[in-house]
Amino acid sequence: MVHPLISIIIPVYNVKDYLDTCLNSVINQTYKELEIIIINDGSTDGSDLICDAYAKKDSRIKLIHQSNAGPSASRNRGLQVATGEYINFVDSDDYIDSDTIEFLYERISQTKSNIVACDFYDTRKHTSKSEVIIYDSSKASKALYSKDTPKFIIADLNAVWAKLYQRDLFNKIRFPEGVLCEDMIVSANIYSKIEKMTLYVCPKYHYIQRESSTMHTPFYSRYYYLYGLFAQYDIGLQRKVITQYPVRGLKITIHFINHVLCDISDESEQKKYIEIGLSYLHKYDNYSPNYLGYILAWKKYLIGRFFSRYKALYNNYCTLIRK
């Protein structure tokens, strides 16, 4: 039986302590018809030499060295050169089970889906669930915004890794460059194009949270998530999947503002991020307390109209907490 070629795109930047595990997990897949596209994004820690060594020992590897441009640019470069019938993404500090690609391919063939996804392990979550969820375009899009969607399902839907995509889904879609949480934006756009997606709540992808990663520092993870969240909301509004910003965005914005006040001492940095937070807060100016809830509406009013007083009160609160 002839199996189609699957392109696995792996952006690499300064992950030498994780890269062997990642690349070994990919080259040793039980599914062999692979095009392994490694984009070394200007690594300076020796990751480039590790990539060179793997490219010499496995002819399926296409290695591209480029100046540092970020993960979105690296993924876009991978999409540009990919020739496989299906696309898969693996982050270079993560790794996959030996049968992950076979698992995804068998199920995308059986279900005739545009996308098949599996669940993932991370350092906080281990699951043995085996639920199967089938989405059409409308259901997948709405699940991103619904307050009833479990958080772990939101994570599964937003991530671009742990999925097998029909290649043509990316014909007119690319990752936005210069931002993080780009997965959230791409996923929202992709779901508008699908007829069927099947999610298997069965973990096959190992998501590693590095302490040194920018996305995993408390402040930046909140900032980039907030950016991605509202970019995703804007897509939902444009496509009329939703008719107004979900309340969840306001709650996260208020938490973000509190975090800035409590944890950023540099005044110019604090001012910059407070202005960003307030810009998201004001997206809810036309929404009534009946929609927001009266407690949330009061917090929004206090922060938006009397910010200097709110700042003083919250700084005092933070001082008491630290004591």
Image (cartoon, grey):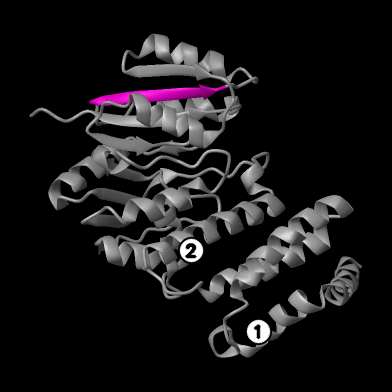
- Which residue is tagged 2? 233
Query: Is the residue 16 above or below the residue 291 in the image?
Result: above
Residue type, mark 1 in image: Ala
Left or right, 200 with reference to 284 = left
For residue 93, say whether it is visible.
no
Residue at image point 31% right, 18% down: 60
**Farthest left residue in view:** 1
Left or right, 34 with reference to 262 = left
Spot occupied by residue 18 in the image (x, y as percentages of width and height) = 55, 30
Which span of residues is magenta-colored?
Answer: 33-41
Spot occupied by residue 202 in the image (x, y as percentages of width and height) = 33, 54
Label 1 crowding class (10 Å Cα cut-off): few <14, some 14-19, many 20+? Answer: some
First in residue order: circle 2 vs circle 1: 2
Q: Determine whether label 2 and label 1 are within 8 Å by CB.
A: no
Residue at image point 57% right, 69% down: 249
- Which image quarter is the C terminus in? bottom right
Spot occupied by residue 76 in the image (x, y as percentages of width and height) = 43, 32
**Front in this rendered view, residue 4 or 210:** 4
Spot occupied by residue 311 in the image (x, y as percentages of width and height) = 85, 71
- Which residue is tagged 1? 297
Would you say the magenta stretch is mainly helix, strand or loop? Answer: strand
Distance in Å between CA atoms under marks 2 and 1: 20 Å
